[in-house]
Amino acid sequence: MARGKKGRHKLRATFRKKHESRQRVRDVTRKFLQDEEKVEDAPGRERVSGKGELSRKRTVVGTRVAGEEGSFEVLPEVDLSQCVPGRVLAVRGLISEVLGDDGVLYECVTRRLLRTLATDDRHVVVAGDRVMVRPVQGTEGVIERVEPRRGVLGRMVRGRRHVLVANVDRIAIVASVAQPILKPNLIDRLLIAAEMSQIEPLICLNKIDLVDPAELQPLAGVYGQLGYRLFFLSASSRFGIARLADELAGRQTVFVGQSGVGKSSILNAIDPSLQLRVAEVSKASEKGRHTTTTATLIPFARGGYLVDTPGIRQMQLWDVIPEELGSAFREFRPYLNYCRFPDCTHTHELECGVKAAVAAGKIDLRRYDSYCHLFAGN
Ligand SMILES: Nc1nc2c(ncn2[C@@H]2O[C@H](COP(=O)(O)OP(=O)(O)O)[C@@H](O)[C@H]2O)c(=O)[nH]1
Ligand SMILES: [Mg+2]
Ligand SMILES: [Zn+2]
């Protein structure tokens, strides 16, 4: 990632007219890149100049930064003396709740220019974003700038990437060992999402009060050998809670996992003042409530943030590009070079390094089975 490559750029862009399609916005982004040197306006100004042209053109002055995967972002210049830095705790429709570094909770709208710059892959403002807020009146403000993101967790919605939360540095993968029954394949799916996002996962096995911990040793052993950190927890008896809380202090951790596994219970056990609602709402009432899918940051008393993701089904997290799946299973990596075909899918091919390693007992059979299910899209 070419982070740190910064430079001031003046960008000339064609802006989407009101009724143009979203596809047009992508073209605009491309046009930014091509036309960046053709500049007319004075620094520090945005200007509409579309004289006699079909589309509106405007020159944006800002800092261009290389984002993830060579993507492109613009940080419009803002008068910093007028702004307070802060972090977006939640987004509700057009209003973002921003906790300013000054301790004030701002209700913010987003500057129109930023909304115009948004693309399908890059939502304007999401929970976790670091932003610059210009206070307007009381606790109302305008988000003038969104800082580049790192550690992004998202999901696919109708084939498109949808960022759920930004700037997290841990994913707590919560599973319950009973009620609902332990599903190691779902843990693997979330581990893949963590590998793809390059965010460190913590595997949390909750409700261990319901089983004999000895039963869990084989599974725990496999994950431990892969280098994943694992926590045995019981939100009800508080077993393991203190150790997990130590791990979360000063970090941005997003909690993910099937509903009913105890995410809210664990968060409440970590910080009883949170009083998050425990036990899932019925499927019927869930449907009617759109707000359930938004991630919300909870400032942690010991520093950092905890992110609850109510209503987000883990099946929807980053869907995986099949060619990348093999290397997202970290124990496959040493064997990938031994596959005869460079595009080996490690399923039906002969002379496959991964399958040979499974047969030799070097790769856990259950993990390989999990791979096959994910590869088949289940
Ligand atoms: N026995 C047991 N039950 C738990 C534990 N943690 C949570 N639960 C129960 O599991 C159900 C779902 O918990 P909740 O926190 O709402 O799960 P969430 O959907 O992942 O947020 C509730 O009835 C909790 O009381 C635990 O450690 N042990
Ligand atoms: Mg919950
Ligand atoms: Zn192979």
Image (tube, grey):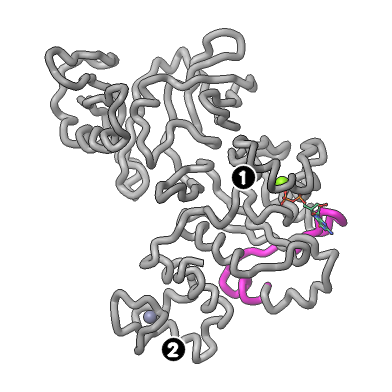
Q: Is residue 102 left or right of residue 180?
A: left
Residue 60, picture quadrant: top left
Q: Say what secondary structure mark 1 lies in.
A: strand
Front-most of residues 234 and 78: 234
Front-most of residues 304 and 274: 274
Q: In this view, does 44 lie to the left or right of 154?
A: left
Q: Say what secondary structure mark 2 lies in.
A: helix
Tell me the residue that label 2 is attached to: 356
The boundaries of the magenta stretch are 220-239
Q: Which residue lies furthest to the front in this view?
A: 284
Is 230 contained in the magenta span? yes
Is 192 contained in the magenta span? no
Measured as percent of width and height from the top left, residue 155 is found at 49, 49
Q: Residue 251 carries which label?
A: 1
**Which one is earlier in the sequence, the residue at label 2 or at label 1?**
1
Q: What residue type is labelled 2?
A: Ala
Measured as percent of width and height from the top left, residue 196 is found at 45, 58
Q: Disc 1 beta carbon < 8 A from ligand 1?
A: no
Residue 294 drawn above or below residue 106: below
Q: What distance separates the C-alpha of mark 2 from that of mark 1?
A: 40 Å
Q: What residue type is labelled 1?
A: Arg
